[in-house]
Image (cartoon, grey):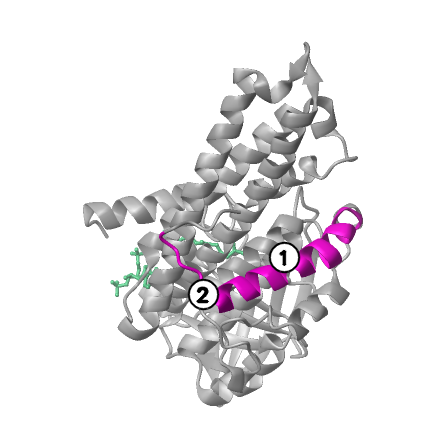
Amino acid sequence: MSDLAIFQLTDEHKMIRDTARDFAENEIAPIAARFDESGEFPHATIQKMGAMGFMGIEVPEEFGGAGMDTLSYVLALEEICKADAAHGVIMSVNNSLYAYGLIKFGTSDQKKRFLTPVAAGKSIGAYSLTEPMSGSDAGTMKSRAVRDGDFYILNGRKSWVTSGPVADYIVVFMMTSPEKKQKGISAFMVEAKTPGFIRGKKEPKLGIRASATSELIFENCRVPVENMIGAEGEGFKIAMTVLDAGRIGIGAQALGIAEAAYEAARQYASEREAFGQPIGAFQGTGFKIADMKTRIEASRLLIYNAALAKERSKTSGERFSLEASMAKLFASETAMFCAHQAVQIHGGLGYSKELPVERYFRDAKITEIYEGTSEIQRMVISRAELGLK
Ligand code: CAA
């Protein structure tokens, strides 16, 4: 990876990037194919990542985190995803969708109880917004939370929850005042041991197979009022704010996949010969390499730029939705483009499980779907640019 001139990485940034790279190459890359094949959750490596501070990079040290900045988070995540995007999404959700919401909206008691174990990687956090009939149009959820004295009683069915089968703590969004639509949604912290919390069907998936995804079912699940995050009715804004952070993480995940696919294709194009020359010397292949490299570096700029915008927002309070959506949109489409070209350049070998290239292809696709599809990112960007609600 080149260090782009306009991003001056500090020694601290280089240190976390290199540490994550060493760990990913030595501990994750060798097991990635096996865990992809079995679909088993990689508990041992995730725990090691927690011990190294990767599961709560931006969480203040007083709450068990590494207390670093957003660029550090992105740099580390990119390296982990070069080795395995499944480890990457577990790390991304833990850091962005789970921890960031608590850092920004949690009370200090909530931070102490729910952030500390997850930031240290001892427990796993999840975020649960989507429902079987409510995905992109997130404001139309059917799940309900009704106040009963010092508790809320939660009922509903959630779907596509990353780490759902293993999470210890889950931030869940439910309607508290359905007539108010988006303004009637509230956020709750649910501990997995709470009666009425049930893990549903685990999704069999095309890619990121070592990460676990499932439905979550709430049947008269009683959650104390002090587990509400933010105020009643603030849930939609919390969900959207947190997703802005999440989208930077998925952008970094996509960048890691794109780089891995590119590196495999670049090497193969210079080694494999056909018709008396390396296949990279044919313009049809050489131009693919050029397009992959250019889109990767453009993605990197957008992602690092979004990371800096998020960092600034910690003091200014300004939103970074536009930067995050542009980064996620471009990087995820770049990941798909690069994985597609890498398979094509490898020919039959690219289609074989002998090499990780087919895994990059399967893993890339989800980055165009979760945490807001490419269509949703285009909606966010165009609405912002056109001044539309
Ligand atoms: N930050 C803060 N506030 C925001 C916001 C943001 N990014 N986006 C919207 N809002 C606020 C608006 O300002 C508005 O508030 P006011 O009325 O007070 O001004 C309110 O929220 C409603 O906004 P909109 O009218 O724009 O809402 P909408 O219903 O039209 O939806 C949307 C907007 C961007 C399409 C949104 O619904 C969206 O992002 N949808 C995609 C959801 C998504 O990404 N789902 C993935 C779930 S997670 C996952 O993938 C699984 C996993 O585990 C990884």
The amino acid type, in three-letter code, at marker 1 is Arg
Q: Is residue 27 magenta?
A: yes
- Mark 2 lies on residue: 10
- Mark 1 lies on residue: 21
Q: Is residue 362 magenta?
A: no
Q: In the shown orientation, is residue 356 left or right of residue 228?
A: right
Where residue 366 appears, x then y in whole percent?
A: 56, 45
Return the disc, 2 or 1, that comes first in the chain's sequence: 2
Tell me what residue is drawn at x 67 percent, y 57 percent. Answer: 24
Where residue 298 appears, x then y in whole percent?
A: 41, 42
Taking depth in this image into account, of 384 and 196 the one nearest to the observer is 384
Identify the element where label 2 is drawn: loop
Residue 145 in view here: no
Tell me what residue is drawn at x 45 percent, y 72 percent. Answer: 101
Callout 2 environment at 10 Å: few (<14), some (14 to 19), or many (20+)? Answer: few
- Quarter of the image where one finds residue 297: top left
Taking depth in this image into account, of 267 and 386 the one nearest to the observer is 267
Q: In the shown orientation, is residue 5 left or right of residue 251?
A: left
The amino acid type, in three-letter code, at marker 2 is Thr
Q: Is residue 31 above or below residue 91?
A: above
Callout 1 environment at 10 Å: few (<14), some (14 to 19), or many (20+)? Answer: many
Q: How many marks?
A: 2
Dominant secondary structure (helix, strand or loop) of the stretch shown in magenta: helix
The residue stretch that appears in magenta: 6-34
- Quarter of the image where one finds residue 141: bottom left
